[in-house]
């Protein structure tokens, strides 16, 4: 959606404007917010699913999907995913609009927050990092 909007504009807005637009589009979406709030990313079931998906994507790499590794945390309340391939990066680079990718990366913080987790990372593929390191930790008081 963001690529279609951006490509349709005669005058291209800056990254700050695109980030604000994408942030508002996603965070003001009641259905998405309700879905994210219902997720328990730190449950045994959710982490088992992540581990399974990570293993599966390693055996069938595809530039038009996410390829990632899963690493459990010191307790069920934390985990890390390392993304080696990003479908957004691949598509937006192919479309010639790689400058917009970081606008989408900011939503990772919102998704984690709505899901009751603190999200941190040091690297992103969008900014030339070796991978996207996504660290999740359940917020205090959230079960």
Image (cartoon, rainbow, N blue to C red):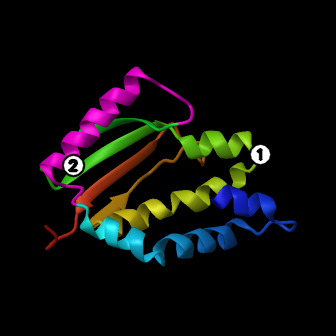
Mark sitting earlier along the chain (1/2)? 2
Residue 67 colored in magenta in the image: no
Q: Is residue 104 above or below residue 85?
A: below
Q: Which residues are magenta?
A: 40-64
Q: Which residue is located at x 25 percent, y 36 percent?
A: 51
Any mark on residue 46, and which? 2
Q: Which residue is located at x 21 percent, y 45 percent?
A: 47
Quadrant for the C terminus in the image: bottom left
Which class describes the residues within 10 Å of circle 2: few (<14), some (14-19), or many (20+)? few
**Residue 5 point in image, percent of width and height:** 71, 63
User: Would you say 55 lies left or right of 18 here?
Assistant: left
Residue 47 colored in magenta in the image: yes
Secondary element under disc 2, as helix, strand or loop, is: helix
**Residue 22 point in image, percent of width and height:** 58, 68
Q: Are discs 1 and 2 less than 8 Å apart at CB?
A: no
Which class describes the residues within 10 Å of circle 1: few (<14), some (14-19), or many (20+)? few
Instruction: Indicate the quadrant where residue 16 lies.
Output: bottom right
Q: Main secondary structure of the magenta part?
A: helix
Secondary element under disc 1, as helix, strand or loop, is: loop
Q: Is residue 26 above or below residue 72?
A: below
Visible residue check, residue 72:
no
Any mark on residue 72, and which? none
The residue furthest top is: 59
Q: Which residue is located at x 50 percent, y 37 percent?
A: 65
**Residue 70 point in image, percent of width and height:** 30, 38
Q: Is residue 92 above or below residue 111?
A: above
Tell me the CA gap for discs 1 and 2: 35 Å
Q: Which residue is mark 1?
A: 96
Instruction: Indicate the quadrant where residue 49 lies.
Output: top left
Quadrant for the N terminus in the image: bottom right
User: Would you say 57 lies left or right of 139 here?
Assistant: right
User: Would you say 52 lies left or right of 3 here?
Assistant: left
């Amino acid at each position: 959606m963001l690529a279609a909007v951006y490509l349709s504009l005669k005058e291209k807005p800056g990254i700050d404007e695109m980030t604000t637009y994408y942030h508002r589009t996603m965070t003001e979406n009641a259905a998405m917010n309700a879905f994210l709030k219902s997720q328990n990313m730190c449950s045994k079931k959710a982490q088992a699913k992540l581990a399974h998906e990570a293993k599966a994507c390693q055996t069938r790499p595809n530039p038009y999907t996410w390829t990632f590794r899963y690493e459990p945390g010191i307790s069920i309340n934390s985990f890390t995913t390392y993304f080696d391939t990003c479908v957004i990066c691949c598509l937006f680079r192919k479309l010639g609009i790689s400058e917009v990718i970081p606008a989408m990366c900011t939503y990772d913080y919102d998704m984690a927050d709505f899901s009751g987790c603190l999200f941190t990372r040091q690297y992103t593929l969008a900014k030339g990092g070796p991978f996207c390191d996504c660290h999740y930790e359940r917020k205090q008081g959230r079960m």
